[in-house]
Each structure stands twice: as structure tokens, then as C-alpha cells.
Image: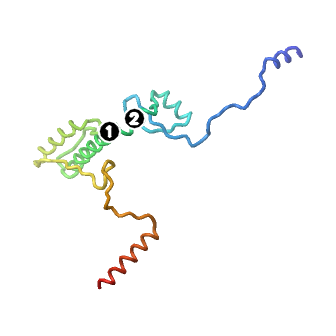
Amino acid sequence: MAGLLERLRARTATPRQAKRGQPYNYPQLWYCRSDGDVVKLPGDPPNRAYYEDKGYTVLRPEEVEEWEREVRPQVIEKMREKASLISTIRRIGSKHPGVEIVDNLDDLDAAELRELLEEVGKVTGAPVTVIARRFGASADAPDRDDAPEIRGGDELADKLKRAAAREKQRS
């Protein structure tokens, strides 16, 4: 019995601390799903293994840069167009009791939605046009040089006092 224990002990290695990565604060990663959609999901090892088992692919850093800089803005623009068409069709359907929309509008592309919108316009007797305009500053708009610049509450208070003093002098 002692001989077996000695042989087993001789084969074992000295214990060492297991190397582990950080246990928290993993950044989210961009994944490409099997249907082609690109989504941002948790990047910790258990979740990463789970998503890779589901067939998702992690985007490489250069792919992430291309996705965020070039492709994603185009995808978002198409999604906004599609959303405005769907909202318009549903709004018309809710306001006209004779119109009932039974299709799953999410499965249609923008061209099919425009055709459906034309059909709905014919049924309601009024032509329908979607005018989609985003209010506010767009992401690609250049910064205005004449825009007011305020850095803190104290600066704002000083500007307001000076403006009030100028108004008093004018009066």
C-alpha cells in the first residue's frame, strides 16, 4: 500500500494557482447571428461560449470598426425607414374601421411595405405619403461655430447677470 501511494505522489505535480481572467467588467462584444443580424451582447466567457454554441460569431476588431463606422449607420437608416412605414400603416389601420392589417409587418422589407401602403391608400380613398424627418442634430452634421458654449453653472450665472445688466443699461 505504501508503495502505491509513493508512486502516485511521485507522478503528481506541485500545486500551482490556476490562471483566471478578470471575474467581472467584461466589455460587450459585437456578434453576428446566424440570420445575419449583428448584435451587441455580453462578452464574459460563459456568455461568449453560449453564443458561440448557438452559432454566433464574434466580430474581430477591424470588423467592429467597419461595422460601427460604415455599415451600422446604413442598417439603422433602413430600420428607421421601415419603422416609419410600419407605424404609418398601423396608424391608418387603427383610424379606419374598414381596414384591418393581418400581415406580420416586421417580416416585410421596405419595398413590400410601400406597396402595402399604396394598397391601404387605395382602400381608404386617400393617397398616403410618408414624410420622415428627424428633428435635432444628426450624427454626421458638422458642429456649428455660432452655437453657444457653456462650460458650467457658474459661467451661465455670470452670463445671465451680464445680460440682465446690459438690459438695465438699455432701459
Q: Residue, x 49% and y 40% (percent of image)? A: 28
How far apart, in angstroms, are the residues tagged by discs 1 and 2? Answer: 10 Å
Residue 19, horizontal then vertical, whole percent: 67, 32
Residue flagged by tag 1: what amino acid is it? Val
In what element is the residue under mark 1?
helix
Residue 160, horizontal then vertical, whole percent: 39, 74
In what element is the residue under mark 2?
strand
Residue bearing the label numbered 2: 38
Does residue 54 sit above or below 76 in this rendering? above
Q: Is residue 36 left or right of residue 103?
A: right
Tell me the quarter of the image containing the C terminus: bottom left
Tell me the quarter of the image containing the N terminus: top right
Asked if marks 1 and 2 touch (Cβ < 8 Å), the reply is yes
Residue 123, horizontal then vertical, whole percent: 12, 44
Does residue 73 sit above or below 51 in this rendering? below
Residue bearing the label numbered 1: 75
Residue 134, horizontal then vertical, whole percent: 27, 52
Q: Quadrant of residue 80?
A: top left
Q: Quadrant of residue 30?
A: top left
Query: In the displayed image of the protein, which residue is found farthest to the right?
Result: 2
